[in-house]
Amino acid sequence: MDELELAPKLAVLKALAADEHVTRVAERLGLPQPTVSRWIAELGDQLGAPLLVKTGRRVRLTRPGRLLAEAAARSMAALEPGLREVEEELDPEKGRVVLGFLHMLGRAIVPELVRGYRAEHPHVRFGLVQNARQAVIDKLVSGEIDLALVAPPPVGPEFESVVVFEQPLIVVVPAGHRLESRRSVRIGDLEGEDLITLEHGYGLRQITDDMCAAAGFTPRYVFECQEIETVRGLVAAGLGVALLTHAEFAPPPGLRELPLTPRTGRIFGLTWLRDHPLPPAVRAFREHALRTHGVQR
């Protein structure tokens, strides 16, 4: 017998174990009485032994019937927490949103997004996953997260992305560097410089590689880091130059920020898997994030 057919029949048997009255059980479960009787008879036929015997107007479970009812009760007790989780997942006011994002977004942007959403949906739970761009995208593809906020957004038929904001790119140099007096810097001006960057897998590293390649030179990386603030610190210490975004807070002493020309931005996109249905809470948070950044869909 198919598990989908078995489950409601076991639920009926469990109810009969508690109230040995077919009519009352049928009414409580919203089933016709003949259906209840037929289901129990089918279970007995499958097992090769009757599960009920009549005692006047009531019924009594046989020993096989009692054993099966006890097994059904244990199975349903184990299943009920999972069913509650599923119900909450499908409730836009009680679901869970798993958002993956870059480390740098954890200081202000993501907390503000979550704060604004939770103000209107206080019972929604969040899983927040911070990592390098490629690691976040990998987790999106594997289904570990629902949404990814990364720069640049991934390209491919399996993804759907919406640009939510852009940060201008700048060149940072140490005090006393030959470029510090420039009003602006071209990416080609960095040819031959000691460059400090992030490791492979980070979005800013990919942008730097692509821009240097487009300018016709191979960058000379002397330090590869995992945190943007480490890059700033190394530049301020006079160990090289870097392509970054403006510091959220006061940059370290000895650092000069120079505009990049032509103006180039680091594009952040909110990404999800195309043709992958999102739970209601995730869809609602996605729309909130897009509204917050003025994106119309």
Image (cartoon, rainbow, N blue to C red):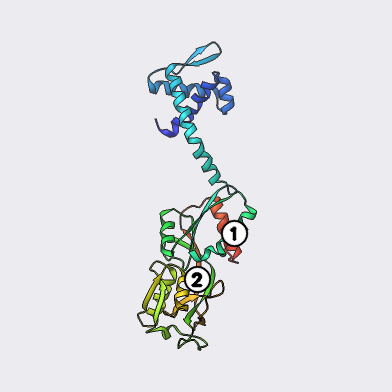
Q: Which mark is residue 109?
A: none
Q: Position of residue 176 (x, y in %)?
A: 47, 86
* Residue to which mark 1 is pinned: 288
Q: Amino acid at mark 2?
A: Ile
Give the vertical position of 115 relative to 95 (above or below). below
Give the vertical position of 253 relative to 135 (above or below). below
Q: Position of residue 216 (x, y in %)?
A: 36, 83
Q: Which mark is residue 267?
A: 2
Among numbered discs 1 and 2, the one appearing first in the sequence: 2
Judging depth in this view, the residue of 280 and 76 nearest the camera is 76
Q: Residue at x 41, y 54 (%)?
A: 142
Judging depth in this view, the residue of 33 and 236 nearest the camera is 236
Element assignment for label 1: helix
The residues tagged by marks 1 and 2 sit, at their Cα atoms, a distance apart of 19 Å
Return the residue found at the far top.
56
Is the residue marked by circle 2 packed among few (<14), some (14-19), or many (20+) residues within 10 Å? some
Q: Residue at x 52, y 88 (%)?
A: 183
Is the residue marked by circle 1 packed among few (<14), some (14-19), or many (20+) residues within 10 Å? some
Q: Amino acid at mark 1?
A: His
Q: Residue at x 50, y 68 (%)?
A: 268
